[in-house]
Image: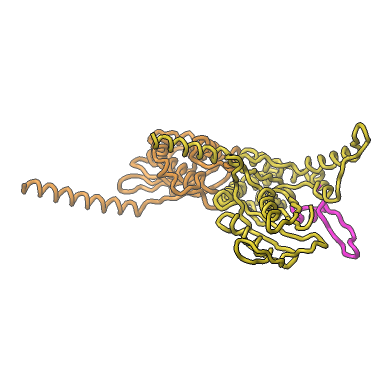
Amino acid sequence: MKKSFLTIITLFAVMLVFGQHAKKPTIMVVPSDHFCISHGYKLTFDNQGTKVVLPDYKAALQGDGSLRLVISKLSGIMAERGFPLKDLEQELKSIAQASAERSVMTSKESGASIVESPIDMLKRTAKSDIIMDIDFEVKKRGPQSYVVFTLNGLDAYTSKSVASASGTGRPSSAAAPELLLEEAVLSHMDKFNGMLMTHFKDMFTNGREVKVEINLFEGFLVDLEEEYDYDGETSELGDIIDDWMADNTVEGRYSNSDNTENFIKFEQVRIPMFYDRKGKQRAMDTKKFVNNLRKFLARDPFNLTCKLYQRGLGEAWLIIGEK
Amino acid sequence: MKKLTKILVIVVLAVGFFGCATTKIDSVYKTGSEILKVGNEGTKLIKVWGYGKTPDIAITDAKRNAVDVAIFKGFSAGGDSDKIFPIVSEDNSRIENKVFFDDFFKVGGKYLQYVNSKNYGVPSGKDRLKLKYGYNVAVSVSIEFDTLRKYLEEKGIARRLDEGF
């Protein structure tokens, strides 16, 4: 009787864990800076005497048929593997449209407009968790054409390359450039997805890799060298936060890459994929993880008020001092 | 009793003798596979070696090897293709799913649905070696790689790219 009861409990626990889904990263194909600038899709402006050249994605997407073909092919392959891509062109259009609508939106009774801080405006850009940075060129050698192709999968928060594939296609004098491009995509996507799979498996085994920053609001009297009596010893606030990271990351994996009395930068922070809430497993993201640190610092003996600022799925800042 | 001992000695010697002979043939075998081209609709064109008493049996063996490599080993970069990772990435999957794979790879098994020979007739020249006890042939086969991957994902044998999300 006891045995069967235990079996039922175990099965229930397993169902709870495996029934949950982690937060799915969004993926978007973005033409590389090199592609945009070398093809003339660029914006040039003068920044206090320094000439700055930036890629003009809108012009590239509107003016380059080959780019559209490659993105379409990549989208089809990724959708089939369970990752429908965010479309950069649609995203840019949607942002422009939403911005226009927001500017004329008012309430019925008082005529109030929508509140929008400068940060809100800055955050409204096309973004995704993984960027497929694509670069290609159809080159000529005598009568023959061939394709040089580079695809990099970049984690938008850690800036790490999580998958990559590149190579030069076989020269052909008969095939059209479009066909060569299609072949290039097909030839490299298996490797790219294989590396992406390795990345995801590592994520589920060792936790999601994110960045966390601790900052202070200007004028706040406490800094990260302030000493507190906590857990039977006197330690600096920075060290206490460091200990909290060690206790709450997967197998204590994180790196305190830089710090002063005003900030701490944590990189390679491995956060768990799930957490418990009311007996149920829920998907963890960086905001939730850092919110736990915020709650910890709000308690005795610290009693600190902190603002939590999220930068997408994989980065969050905790700013001590105010909300 | 003496008779029984004699029989046992003969059996042991025979096993030893034929065992050595097999090893000798094995060393002559050509094995392995290489990717020739990645096709549309998730197909891969592979050149693969097989062995059998007759060329036809060797071709069937080559087809089986092609599917086996696609599932468990993947292909090194070659032809017009970049490296292709194996469909099943877990090292012990073959053992863990022994019942499934024994059935999948049995004579006339389901694996044949995912591989087609691109050779016309029996291979000749460098692609056909006559060995003492049979034939070693190299054939070009087309593997329905994506369809095979989806089938193994549905059966829970292969991990989906979006698994867990």
Residue A54 visible, this angle: yes
In this picture, is A223 found above or below A9? below
Left or right: where A269 falls relative to A51 = left
Q: Give the range drawn in magenta.
A: A31-57
Any part of residue A191 in sight? no
What's the colour scheme?
A: by chain
Is A52 inside the magenta-drawn segment? yes
Q: Which residue is drawn at 10% across and 49% down?
A: B6
Q: In this view, does A60 lie to the left or right of A284?
A: right
Query: In which quadrant is the N terminus of chain A drawn?
Result: top left
Nearest the eye: B59 or B18: B18
- Pinpoint residue A66: horizontal percent, then vertical percent: 74, 45
Q: Which residue is drawn at 40% across and 44% down?
A: B95
Where's residue A71, x and y in %? 71, 43
What is chain B's hue in the picture?
orange
Chain A rendering hue: yellow
Expressed as whole percent of the image width and height from the top left, the position of residue A278 reads 60, 40
| A120 to B99, vertically: above or below | below
The answer to which image quadrant residue A275 occupies is top right
Left or right? Give the position of A168 relative to A18: right
